[in-house]
Image (cartoon, rainbow, N blue to C red):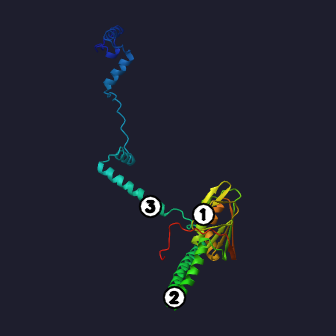
Amino acid sequence: MSVNDNPPEEPTGSELPPQDEQEQGEREAQAGRPAQPAEAKDSEAAGAAAGEPEAAEPAEPAEPAQTGRQRLAEVLWPPRVSRAQLIVALLLFVLGLGLAIQVRSNSDSSALRGARQEDLVRILDELDGRTKRLEDEKQRLEDQRKELESSSNQAEEARRQTVEKERQLGILAGTVAAQGPGITLKITDPKGQVQSDQLLDTLQELRAAGAEAIQINGVRIGASSFFSDEGGGIGIDGKKITQPYEFKVIGKPQDLEPALNIPGGVVQTLEKEQATVAVTRSAKIVVDALRAAKQPDYARSSSS
């Protein structure tokens, strides 16, 4: 029988006798730690023997880098406004508001903005006609003055001019019948939408175009004529008239008719109210309705 000279190997920590393992588990249980199984202890011991490093704690995730837009938003909001900046901003707002109002008032849609070229030419001709009428009136008055200064019988010439002036004023005042070239304007209003103010606008447009005598449905128009809305019709100087409304106008037809047909003028306005407008030129218009001449109560001629 051979004898082994090598000394017996001592049991390692991973090869503890079962009794020692039981005692170690009791000690750990008394210390408040759960007993680890032998396999876990062997793996820990093997890891320690191999010199493996312990697992590092997980690091916190790094914040993502901000974009240029985010940095700009942080700079601009919340706003940091000083008192001086607030005053400047208020002044700029007021200035911008004023400029906007000015541009809006200058760029408002006008009736002539969308007018055709022939309409603009016609309006220009009408303005030229008004200018010519004023120049003719000026020349006529100057001729009368020269006749009075150069006439041998100044008293007779003054009397003749006075009679002529009285006739002219009688026509304008409506106390004298008149006839001459002009137009007839007929307005048919089946739905009753035309109001007194629209007839007044028509009258004013005719006067501005050079109308010398006007009669509406048998009522002579004078300087003091007024319009009012009556039940089922329109009143002129307190006299009720019903449609169709017929204007008899003495004047230059070439000036009167274009004045009514300008873009945005009388005809277009009345047609928007679903009224029918007919304008007829005539070489002879008779205005025979008369107004009563009123004697002034207080006014007297300064020459008497």
Residue visible at 58% across and 80% down? 163
Rounded to the nearest whole Å, what is the CA distance between mark 2 and mark 3? 59 Å
On screen, residue 94 versus residue 279, left or right, reads left
Query: Which sits earlier in the primary sequence, circle 1 or circle 3?
Result: 3
Q: Nearer the viewer, mark 1 or mark 3?
A: 1
- Three-letter code for the amino acid on which mark 2 is drawn: Gln
* Label 3 packing within 10 angstroms: few (<14), some (14-19), many (20+): few
Front-most of 28 and 176? 176
| Sequence-first tag of 2 and 3 | 3
Q: What is the C-alpha distance between the residues marked 1 and 3?
A: 31 Å
Q: Between tags 2 and 1, which lies in front?
A: 2
Element on which disc 3 rests: helix
Percent across and percent down for residue 97 are 42, 56
Q: Is residue 117 visible?
A: no
Marks 2 and 1, the one that precedes in the sequence: 2
The numbered dot on residue 154 is 2
Say whether residue 141 is visible.
Answer: yes
- On residue 102, the disc is 3
* Left or right: where 56 falls relative to 97: left
- Residue at point 32%, 16% (across, down): 13
Q: Quadrant of the N terminus?
A: top left
Label 2 sits on a secondary structure element that is: helix
Give the side of residue 192 with respect to residue 76, left or right. right
Q: Percent x, y for residue 243?
A: 70, 61
Amino acid type of the residue tagged 1 in the rendering: Leu
Q: Amino acid at mark 3?
A: Gln
